[in-house]
Amino acid sequence: MADKSTFTTDRGEGGETHQHVPAKGPHDGEDHLTTNQGIRVSDNQNQLKVGARGPVLLEDFALREKIFHFDHERIPERIVHARGSAAHGYFELYESLSDITKADIFQRAGEKTPLFTRFSTVAGGAGSVDTPRDVRGFAVKFYTKEGNWDLVGNNIPVFFIQDAIKFPDLVHSVKMEADRGYPQAASAHDTFWDFISLMPESTHMIMWAMSDRTIPRSLAMIEGFGVHTFRMINAEGNSTFVKFHWKPKLGVQSTIWDEAVKIAGADPDFHRRDLFERIDRGDFPEWELGLQLFDEAFAEKFEFDVLDPTKIIPEEVLPVRIVGRMVLDRWPDNFFAETEQVAYCPANIVPGLDFTNDPLLQGRLFSYLDTQKSRLGTANFHQIPINAAKCPVMNFQRDGMMQMLQPKGRANYEPNSLNEAGEVTGPRECPATGFSSFDGADSVGEIGANKVRLRSESFADHYSQARLFFRSLHEAEQAHLASALVFELSKVGLVHVRTRMLSNLVNVDAGLAKRVAEGLAMPVPKASLAAAAPRDFDPSPALRIIEGPRQRETLEGRAVGILYADGSDGAEVAAVRKAVEAAKGKPVLISPKVGGAKLNDGTLLAADGQLAGTPSVIVDAIALVLSADGAAALAKDAAAVQFVMDAFGHLKAIGASDGAKALLSKAGVEASDGVTGLGKDFIAAAGRRFFAREPEVRMLA
Ligand code: HDD
């Protein structure tokens, strides 16, 4: 077979000859293009035709195989959490927990366990934007020496519903509406609020969903929660209850709603890109693993049922014990092979951990295994490298579609006596080291003797913790939450749904209900019937972001946009850039043209982004390093004016050179906290948002 790197195609018209030269490659080495059957491909540019202008031949197997494979490239997207981004990393244990659990991953301080973590939105499809108002999935697959442990949580510690049987209804209501096929990735529509207003148990989760938690600044700045109460079992077989927490090293930070909406347009992949770039530049995202550990006596006296997934245990009541950290330090080689094919399942746990009877968790234990078969097409999905355990896997499960293993020998059942001595061949069960379930012998594990379709009375209080959450927030966050409710309910056409939702809100907080009703220009209805009267608890500062224990006002891990143009002072640009880097921030150079601008010292400084394509919503603070002429020119450019106006409206620090005045005044920037020169005070301000400015720039509920 001729190995042609250059060939000629006779176009057949006027004797004209068309030369096609494929890009140079290692054609004489080992890297030959082949079909999936290993046949070398001679031409990957032209299909086999009867003459240059003739029909295609069916015998072109290279063409047919390639198109056939392409036609089947997509697999069903996840029914929820379809949009996600993931990375590899490790878990490092700080201290041995051998007194509490026998799980191998928690035995030896300093030991690292590889893991793969996927973050996701819930409602939107795989191609939807990264920044809708939505819960974020936080799923971690630990490849432990005793098999895979999946901690499949969210960035919110509670859930919408108490029984798994309601999950399909919840998801149907939030996804695009059945008849019209919209809206995509948005809860602000009739069916969602219709369902929610009829499900009082969702009220606590709704408070979180309407709070700033659902519009995070970065995936590296969200908390994670295992939600359910689990058990840890030690070598003696004793059980300790546990709730899992992930605490981000960079602190918890959110965007402003108007900002999140604009980011969706500016960069639909905002969170994915951000995660990729952090890892790419070596700023590895990091979280600490925290545990809330408690015993039966605590569970007995706690005001709520620890099996109820719509309830938290406030950190002030039961502190979070930090036991290790997770570092994400490697982006997947291939998005599809890893991020798309990874199959999490809450039922994947290891000896030393156990479930509780939380009815939502119990339902999840079925759902995930089932969905993987549907998505990945075969019961052998566990053999895909990203899902494969990194410890020996031995059993007699056999065959099935896409079987990748070739087990040897005659034994495919157990017990057997197939070897010459008449003994069992192959792996055996092990009562001592195998996974065993806690015997349930405590008041939390107790199982009623009758088959019933009942919700426990102890799950009946739907409002007290919703109230606790709302009242624990900073006043700016309360205003955001109230405004989010107004925004969402304003998109609800069915007036009776809005009214019913307001009735539920009266049970949460009369002031909140009044603010939302005023925002909708509707009367406040009577409180809806509550199964249990709401109670008052001491606020939990750990629940607030602003001025809470997880807020970090720092430039570390944050970005500063430096806007410059022709005539800008080169020394000033350099100084701001250096100061941002010294504060562990990321400078982003922005100028009207990506090739750069000519500074006053005559040098051409290339930009990271073109002004029109790099709005201020993608950075945390802005520095305007402009000459008077430069600012006057930019004052006539909508992108520049919007750049500054948005930074001000999104409560960011603005540092400006003396020359920048014309642009500041065109953008309506007034003297305000956080509007500074370019010196130290700017760097000090740049890691913060100025919430006190908000009433000047936005009407909130
Ligand atoms: Fe779920 C995916 C988290 C309740 C059924 N869920 C999924 C993912 C996360 C969660 C993070 C994405 C995993 C990934 O990145 O691939 N889900 C939760 C949390 C819940 C919860 C924290 C409540 C505490 N989920 C829940 C219930 C059911 C499901 C009650 C069904 C009874 N979830 C699924 C699923 C998904 C899923 C349909 C879709 C894709 C997948 O599993 O692999 O099985």
Image (cartoon, helix red, strand yellow):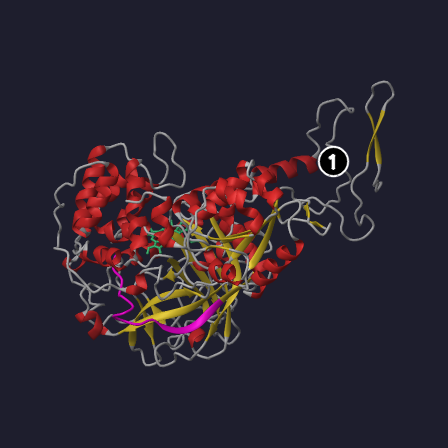
Label 1 beta carbon within 8 A of ligand 1: no
Answer few, some or many: residues within 10 Å of disc 1's Cα (few below 14, many 20 plus, some between 14 and 19). few
Q: Answer whether residue 91 is visible to the viewer in this image.
A: yes
Specify the quadrant of the image occupied by residue 299.
bottom left
Residue at screen point 27% across, 40% down: 193
Q: Position of residue 231 (x, y in %)?
A: 31, 70
Q: Is residue 322 magenta?
A: yes
Q: Answer whether residue 341 is visible to the viewer in this image.
A: no
Residue at screen point 42% across, 46% down: 649
Q: Position of residue 510 (x, y in %)?
A: 17, 49
Q: Position of residue 659 (x, y in %)?
A: 58, 48
**Residue range (magenta):** 310-326
Q: Is residue 323 above or below residue 205?
A: below
Q: Is residue 423 magenta?
A: no
**Secondary structure, magenta segment, majority class:** loop
Residue extending farthest to the top is: 14
- Write down the residue under mark 1: 45
Q: Position of residue 322 (x, y in %)?
A: 39, 73
Q: Describe residue 29's horizontal placement relative to residue 368 as left or right.
A: right
Q: Describe residue 27's horizontal placement relative to residue 585 as left or right.
A: right
Instruction: Name the foreground residue: 551 vs 454.
Output: 551
Residue type at mark 1 is: Gln
Instruction: Name the foreground residue: 197 vs 433.
Output: 197
Residue at screen point 20% across, 36% down: 522
